[in-house]
Amino acid sequence: MENLENQKKGNMDFIHHYVPPTQAGKQGPTLLLLHGTGGDENDLLDLGRMLAPEVGLLSPRGNVSENGMPRFFRRLAEGVFDVPDLIQRTQELADFVESASTIYSFDAKKVIAVGFSNGANIAASMLLLRPQVLLAAVLLHPMVPLVPEEMPKLTGKRVFIGAGRRDPIVPMQNTERLVTLLREAGADVETHWHSGGHTITHEEIREAKQWIQVSL
């Protein structure tokens, strides 16, 4: 891939790709790309380029393995999360993003998470536990990751949620609970529902791209 920089696992503890912005995108945000279960640091690079062709991309691989499939945190069963592990992994990911901003010289105040499924869940967890790390988030097929003991103030945070009405993994009610939770914390949440299941649709990408342009 053009502009693909070093893939490494070092003092930042995540195998990852960083793709620098083009000249035109240097003052814009950086997209933090967070894959779903079984994905890796390559999975969402094309999606990132479709959403915002000029900006930088930071794409880590989840450090947890579930039967050989990378994830960002452990689960006990389908839809049942290991909350202590989720909290720990969320803090680790947030620390990684802050370290990466120094190493790659991007603006730490302009990071937009783009996550699918497991990646969307840990992005939502970052909003709830370390909101200062994210400017905004695109959550594709997320669930409620956890309800923190103390709710953050998310006033000024923008969130796009894409979901399927026939998603066999994420019930509509769970997505609606997440929307309510984020809005009650003050976030500006836009939702896009499609008639399909647990897959990213072209329509979702188009709507997310239009939404994300506001932050560029």
Image (spheres, rainbow, N blue to C red):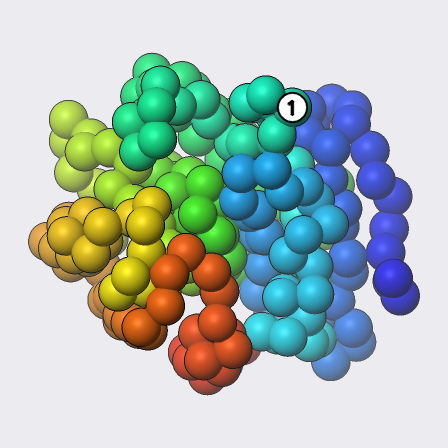
Relative horizontal placement of residue 158, taking residue 7 as reference (left or right): left
Give the image location of residue 184, x and y in percent: 10, 53
Q: Is residue 128 above or below residue 110?
A: above
Q: Nearer the viewer, residue 132 or 7?
A: 7
Give the image location of residue 41, x and y in percent: 70, 44
Relative horizontal placement of residue 215, taking residue 76 as reference (left or right): right
Give the image location of residue 43, x and y in percent: 67, 52
Give the image location of residue 63, x and y in percent: 61, 25
Q: Nearer the viewer, residue 85 or 164?
A: 164
Relative horizontal placement of residue 104, taking residue 83 as reference (left or right): right
Q: Does any portion of residue 112 appear in the rendered image?
A: yes
Residue type, label 1: Gly
Q: Residue at x 18, y 33 (%)?
A: 147
Image quarter (top left, top right, bottom left or bottom right) of the N terminus: bottom right
Residue 130 occupies quadrant: top left
Q: Which residue is mark 1?
A: 68
Q: Residue at x 61, y 30 (%)?
A: 69
Q: Residue at x 45, y 80 (%)?
A: 203
Q: Does any portion of residue 209 appear in the rendered image?
A: no
Q: How many marks?
A: 1
Image quarter (top left, top right, bottom left or bottom right) of the C terminus: bottom right
Q: Is residue 100 above or below residue 33?
A: above
Residue at disc 1, secondary structure:
loop
Q: Residue at x 54, y 31 (%)?
A: 71
